[in-house]
Image (cartoon, rainbow, N blue to C red):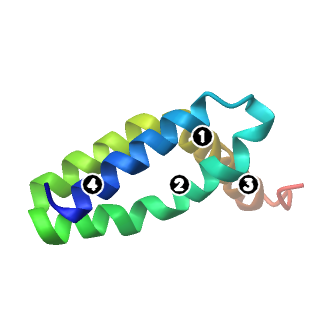
Amino acid sequence: MSAPLVAACLWVLAGVGVAMLPMRRQFLPGGMLLLGAPALLIWIGAVHGLWAGLAATLAVLSMFRRPLREVLRRVLRRASGRASGRGGQ
């Protein structure tokens, strides 16, 4: 097994470990995993090709679907507040 796939397996195990933590303790380690994901995805894509990179991207999106949905909701809420002239506050 290649180094990127071993790293991806360890990343998934770390994500499962973070998911077992109480919610108030998930933010920092979950955020660190989310910040490290793009580098891992690029590494997988560079070594194994586009389709493997896309499959890994779908796996990351699946694991972090709720936090990413919340971030997207907040960004859109702020953008719509600024577009309508309310200043986002």
Verify CB contact (< 8 Å) between mark 1 and mark 2: yes
Q: Residue at x 43, y 59 (%)?
A: 37
Visible residue check, residue 36 = yes
Q: Disc 4 and disc 2: Cα gap in Å?
A: 17 Å
Q: Which of pointers 2 and 3 indicates the residue nearer the eye?
A: 2
Among numbered discs 1 and 2, the one appearing first in the sequence: 2
Question: How packed is label 3: few (under 14 Cα within 10 Å), some, or many (20 or more)?
Answer: some
* Residue type highlighted by circle 4: Val
Dividing the image into 4 quarters, which one contains the C terminus? bottom right
Asked if the residue under mark 1 is in contact with the one under mark 3, i.e. CB atoms within 8 Å, the reply is: no
Q: Which residue is mark 1?
A: 67
- How many other residues sit within 10 Å of disc 1, few (<14), some (14-19) or many (≥20)? some
Label 1 to label 2: alpha-carbon separation: 10 Å
Helix, strand or loop at mark 3: helix
**Label 3 or label 4, whichever comes before in sequence order:** 4
| Element under disc 4 | helix
Q: Position of residue 83 (x, y in %)?
A: 70, 60
Query: Residue at image x 68%, y 57%?
Result: 79
Q: Report which residue position mark 4 lands on.
A: 6
Q: Amino acid at mark 3?
A: Arg
Distance from disc 1 to disc 4, alpha carbons, whole Å, reads: 25 Å
* Residue 12 lies in quadrant: top left
Location of residue 21 in the rendering, given as x and y in whole percent from the top left corner? 68, 31
Sooner in the amino-acid sequence: mark 1 or mark 4: 4
Of the numbered discs 4 and 2, the one sitting upstream in the chain is 4
Query: What residue is shown with label 2?
Result: 34
Residue placed under numbered mark 3 in the picture: 78
Q: Earlier in the sequence, mark 3 or mark 1?
A: 1
Measured Cα–Cα span from mark 3 to mark 4? 39 Å
Q: Amino acid at mark 1?
A: Pro
Identify the element where label 1 is drawn.
helix
